[in-house]
Image: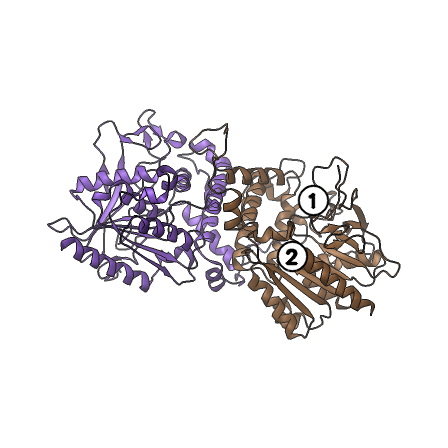
Chain colours: A brown, B purple
């Protein structure tokens, strides 16, 4: 039974980039061709085409941000809490678009796609991709949809990096940005966690240098990477409240090393479900894109990086997010303010950690709703 | 060249438990026999036998806490910063003892030891061991050394758990305790990190259900477990200062997924060196002992657990330690105070994270030195 405040049944569409004919130029120097972007849309584009909001997903996300793919779908899209009739991104008012990133494994071209040069999956022959590459591909999608300017672009975590990149790369094409729980450059600690996840995948004998398609692949390694991720997405307090030191009941395996704590069962289950829906090579490429995103290095400083920025900005962070801590958001805010950019900032008090942006969060809903209303009003004035 | 403030050349000794003749009773119900404890001592036991200090090691430690095993040793013992002439545990004044835990792999009986029932290494047939088991074995060692009462027992992290257990289990045999950077029960987050490390070891095909002795063993899995550990022993700020986002020079492998950041090289090196000195099965058993340590659960509450406690206590925590955060130390202090126990507490301000207790730390040195002087003075009065 699909809830009434959902966008309802949706399907993922495909956009094949035709321009330029020789492929999408990549930051790494090469070109990628062919390029497909998987995307979904919710709501209706206004005749003036001035109500489009682009949603950018995080590491493990996809184009399926809201609604259900079938009436008996167990789960809706990844940001169902925020996208739908009457929600933060109100689909009665806005035309919402979400696309899977380049390098992904949910319909967009990535390392699991067929390399036209060999007729086999790219694997590690897929070129390195960046946040900038994905944003340029998204721009092509919007051109294709006939949308000259976004009312807003928003996303959390890696999605927030795409928001920053949109404001830098296409300042005339975006009226506002809402980067959430993000950073303009990942910390050494964040890189370290990603690196261990990659190590787990690449030392799994099932990885086979990336050429595992058709086989089981590095399932154990990917599950371990996901488990590490999940710990970093929560907080000490959230894990204490959710699991504490509670034991599991009815353990089949009563060995000395049984996974006796509830938190162990949780991590095992999250790891096991992830390997059924995510490609390990995509995990490698996307975490690398996250680690390497660093507009301050590229432009000389974060202040210079935002020099062409015009979009109004709402920056949101969460008090217990230790993977993308509030001080990272404040660095973004300082660089925006230094450029005289219209910028609001709010740190939401919560114990939910980095994952807070994905959960029901009335404060986040109100902040986004109010901000979008103001941006739309001022854009029309 | 051995520094002048070192205890100098030392060697690891072995103590074979002879009493009771049928083996060491374990918390899990069984008995372990034979049992060997590897240990080292530094300084001289006073004729009154009233200057003995027991040092308890953390997860990856050993009996080799101070000094050098040979003149060309590259590295001294693991707590060289704290143990030696004129140091916090001043070997000109105190007789310092350190033993390897039961379940360890540095001379004490553990899963890599020969099971007399089969003539082969125990592997997973080694019984589950606890912090309490190790403390009872240490008590036998002290009986053997003819030391009726410790002037103090100290240790950081898991070593601090042993300190707490000493005060609970043998209140008449210990005049003081110095638990550092520790907890009376690991958090859900801490259990989660340990669980992922165990998963990395046990899903490594080289683990072979624990029967890998003579082979390479689960080297990749153990390295990954160690990498995860290292991230949790540091802090966001310490990693930022130590590595930031600096790139490595002269990378041999310029692939899309090269370990290009310095922090990646550091983790790789730490993982690689660990597999040469530590046994993966010991890692499993010892982390499990850490996860399961919970005197509050055993005794009904932490206040009740310390009901028989008499030792004077100095509790030390570190402001940036997020694995054993200060609030855990405060829980210990509250339970001690509720029992009217003489207890001092200090949170040392540092950015070094959990590892701070192992580093040069003048505040820690002064706190320990002053506390031990007072305890000795009062014990003699």
| Horizontal arrangement in the rendering, residue B359 relative to residue A286 (left or right) | left
| Tag in front: 2 or 1 | 2
Q: Which image quadrant is residue A46 in?
A: bottom right
Crowd around label 2: few <14 · some 14–19 · many ≥20 (10 Å): few
| Horizontal arrangement in the rendering, residue A292 relative to residue A41 (left or right) | left
**Residue at (72, 58) in percent of width and height:** A369
The residue pinned by badge 1 equals A112
Q: Which image quadrant is residue A135 in?
A: bottom right
Q: Are marks 2 and 1 on the same chain?
A: yes
Tell me residue B71's x, y (percent). 26, 55
Reading the chain from its start, which is encountered first: label 2 or label 1?
Answer: 1
Tell me residue A281's x, y (percent). 64, 46
Tell me residue B346's x, y (percent). 34, 59
Taking the view exactly as shown, the residue that stands out farthest to the top is: B117
Q: Chain of mark 2?
A: A
Tell me residue B121's x, y (percent). 36, 31
The residue pinned by badge 2 equals A363
Q: Mark 2 near mark 1, Cβ–Cβ under 8 Å?
A: no
**Considering the numbered disc 2 on the image, is that residue within a helix, a strand or a loop?**
helix
Taking the view exactly as shown, the residue that stands out farthest to the right is: A47
Which residue occupies the foreground of this view, B25 or A143? B25
**Residue at (48, 62) in percent of width and height:** B237
Which residue occupies the foreground of this view, A182 or A8? A8
Q: Which quadrant of the rendered structure holds the C terminus of chain B?
A: bottom left
> From where the camera sits, is residue B12 visible?
no
**Residue at (54, 55) in percent of width and height:** A320
Separation of residues labelled 2 and 1 (CA atoms): 39 Å
> From where the camera sits, is residue B354 visible?
yes
Q: Is residue A62 placed above or below B345 in the rendered structure? A: above
Which residue occupies the foreground of this view, A300 or B196? B196
Residue A375's disc number: none
**Considering the numbered disc 1 on the image, is that residue within a helix, a strand or a loop?**
loop
């Amino acid at each position: 039974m699909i809830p009434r405040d959902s966008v309802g049944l949706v399907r993922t569409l495909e956009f094949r980039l035709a321009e330029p004919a020789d492929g999408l130029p990549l930051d790494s120097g090469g070109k990628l061709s062919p390029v497909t972007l998987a995307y979904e849309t919710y709501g209706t584009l206004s005749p003036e085409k001035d109500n489009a909001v682009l949603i950018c997903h995080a590491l493990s996300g996809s184009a399926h941000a809201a609604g259900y793919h079938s009436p008996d779908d167990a789960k809706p899209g990844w940001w169902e809490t925020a996208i739908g009739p009457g929600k933060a991104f109100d689909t009665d008012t806005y035309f919402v678009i979400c696309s899977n990133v380049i390098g992904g494994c949910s319909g967009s071209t990535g390392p699991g796609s067929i390399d036209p040069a060999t007729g086999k999956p790219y694997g590690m022959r897929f070129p390195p991709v960046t946040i900038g590459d994905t944003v340029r591909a998204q721009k092509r999608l919007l051109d294709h949809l006939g949308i000259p300017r976004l009312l807003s672009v928003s996303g959390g975590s890696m999605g927030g990096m795409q928001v920053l990149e949109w404001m830098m790369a296409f300042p005339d094409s975006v009226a506002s940005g809402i980067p959430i729980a993000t950073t303009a450059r990942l910390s050494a600690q964040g890189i370290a966690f990603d690196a261990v996840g990659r190590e787990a995948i690449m030392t799994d004998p099932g990885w086979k240098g990336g050429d595992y398609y058709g086989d089981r692949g590095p399932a154990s390694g990917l599950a371990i990477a996901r488990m590490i991720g999940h710990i970093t997405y929560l907080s000490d307090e959230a894990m204490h409240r959710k699991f504490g030191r509670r034991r599991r009941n009815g353990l089949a395996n009563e060995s000395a090393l049984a996974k006796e704590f509830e938190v162990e069962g949780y991590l095992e289950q999250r790891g096991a479900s992830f390997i059924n829906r995510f490609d390990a090579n995509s995990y490698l490429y996307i975490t690398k894109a996250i680690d390497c995103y660093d507009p301050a290095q590229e432009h000389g400083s974060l202040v210079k990086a935002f020099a062409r920025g015009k979009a109004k900005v709402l920056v949101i962070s969460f008090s217990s997010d230790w993977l993308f801590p509030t001080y990272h958001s404040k660095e973004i805010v300082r660089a925006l303010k230094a450029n005289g950019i219209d910028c609001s900032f709010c740190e939401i008090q919560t114990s939910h950690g980095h994952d807070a942006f994905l959960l029901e969060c009335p404060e986040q809903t109100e902040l986004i709703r109010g901000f979008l209303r103001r941006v739309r009003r001022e854009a029309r004035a």
